[in-house]
Amino acid sequence: MEVRGIRNNNPGHLNYVGRAGAHLEKNVHPRFAVFATPEAGLMALRGQLLRYNQRDGLDTVKGIISKWAPPTENDTASYIEGVAHALGVTPDQKIGPFTPHLVAGLMRAIILMENGQNPYGPLIDRVARLQEAVA
């Protein structure tokens, strides 16, 4: 059986919040969004990362992951270390402008942390390069 995030086309394990193009998963304890395609789920992951940066001013791995995976439900310290290591930065280091390269790196690291695998390959790079505005 596929892991939940891959099965739901939601590799970032985003909660369902009524966003267009998503619906609430159907299981005993529904919480997460289900997207129609892997691309839609990757777009939602990308959009959330951009909102964290643009709206919330988060520009360190520690800041982003502390909000993404709060310690009330995650081993946030290990998650931060894993993402920082994947990006080759320290947890408190400013990671610079959110270029497509940086966004793709964050997406890859988050997908791996959330799912234990990353089956998306170059699709992540294509999604990360999209330029449309994030609401």
Image: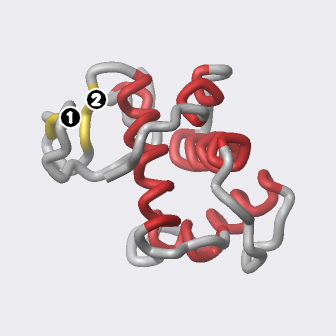
Q: Position of residue 72 (x, y in %)?
A: 39, 77
Q: In this rendering, would 34 be left or right of 77?
A: left
Quadrant where the N terminus sits is top left
Residue at 21% of width from left, 48% of height from top? 16
Residue at 62% of width from left, 71% of height from top? 59
Q: Which residue is mark 1?
A: 22
Residue 2 in which image quadrant: top left
Amino acid on which disc 2 is placed: Phe
Q: In this rendering, would 118 be left or right of 16?
A: right
Q: Earlier in the sequence, mark 2 or mark 1?
A: 1
* Disc 1 residue crowd, few under 14, some 14–19, many 20+, Cα 10 Å: many
Residue 6 in which image quadrant: top left
- Label total for image: 2
Element type at mark 1: strand
Please indicate, yes or no, whether residue 119 appears anywhere in the rendered image: no
Q: Nearer the viewer, residue 117 or 125?
A: 125
Q: Position of residue 39 (x, y in %)?
A: 43, 24
Q: Which residue is mark 2?
A: 35
Element type at mark 2: strand
Residue at 60% of width from left, 29% of height from top? 124
The reply to whether dot 2 and dot 1 touch (C-beta < 8 Å) is yes
Q: Nearer the viewer, residue 29 or 101?
A: 101
